[in-house]
Amino acid sequence: GGSEGAKRRAGQRAAREVESGWVVGLGTGSTAAHAIRALEDADVRGIPTSYQSRGLAIEAGVPLTSLDEVEGVDLSIDGADQFARGSGALIKGGGGAHAREKIIDGAADRFLVVADPTKATDVLDRPVPVECLPDARPVVENRLRECGGEPDLREAAGKDGPVITDNGNLLIDCAFGAIEDPGGLATRLSAIPGVVEHGLFVDLADTVYVGIEEGVERIDY
Ligand code: DER
């Protein structure tokens, strides 16, 4: 979705918040990619959240590190599939990287979301990606239905069969319609045995940068 110019403006604006010597979480997706490229000459170490963001960081010459080599994460920059304007709650996982993203985004002192205007909404209503241990899929799908969802196994492109995540698990996109209580649903999804991680990011985003026609809108939470 969203125009590439809007994504670029949001990503580049977020990258300007990075200071020398910082450890930066490198989000996944086409919007976060602009932030990674903008860090090309910065004196930072990046922690990637996927093979995709790792490859982009290597291309950009951003030195890589990992959680067990640093004291903490100063800032994380990541995209979103949807964000609720009022609360800053997110749906992430369109790129299948939300398990590692939530670890890094949650560990960061500040978590900046970068988005184009198509991601903004009043009420989250996109399907929620759920990463699931492969053998648990039947029981996870049943529990997702009990939560009022319609589970849909994410089929791969360029490979027969389902998508396999960077962690070796399956992805289930679960439609719930309008999600009036993201926090309550997030708690229920986290309690399902076999669920590795879901794409509801509640109370995590500190700032959202939205690339708009004439610049970048900043929303602080
Ligand atoms: O997977 C994710 O959560 C990504 O951040 C993502 O879905 C946003 O991707 P985009 O910036 O390419 O729209």
Image (cartoon, rainbow, N blue to C red):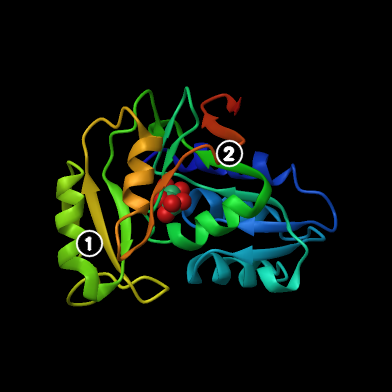
The residue labelled by disc 2 is 10
Q: Is residue 24 left or right of residue 105?
A: right
Question: What numbered label is drawn on residue 154?
Answer: 1
Residue 218 pos. (x, y %): 61, 27
Q: Are marks 2 and 1 in contact (CB under 8 Å)?
A: no
Q: Quadrant of the C terminus?
A: top right
Q: Quadrant of residue 48?
A: bottom right
Q: Nearer the viewer, mark 2 or mark 1?
A: 1
Amino acid tagged 2: Ala
Vertical relation: 149 (above or below) 21: above
Residue 162 pos. (x, y %): 21, 71
Check disc 1: other Cα within 10 Å, few if <14, some if 14-19, many if 20+. Answer: some
Question: Does residue 8 appear in the picture of this structure?
Answer: yes
Q: Earlier in the sequence, mark 2 or mark 1?
A: 2
Outermost residue to the right: 20
Q: Is residue 165 left or right of residue 101?
A: left
Q: Quadrant of residue 53?
A: bottom right
Residue 172 pos. (x, y %): 24, 59
Please tell me which residue lies in front, 4 or 171: 171
Please tell me which residue lies in front, 121 or 185: 185
Vertical relation: 98 (above or below) 85: below
Amino acid tagged 1: Arg
Question: Does residue 153 appear in the picture of this structure?
Answer: no
Q: Residue at x 22, y 60 (%)?
A: 140
Q: Secondary structure at mark 2?
A: helix
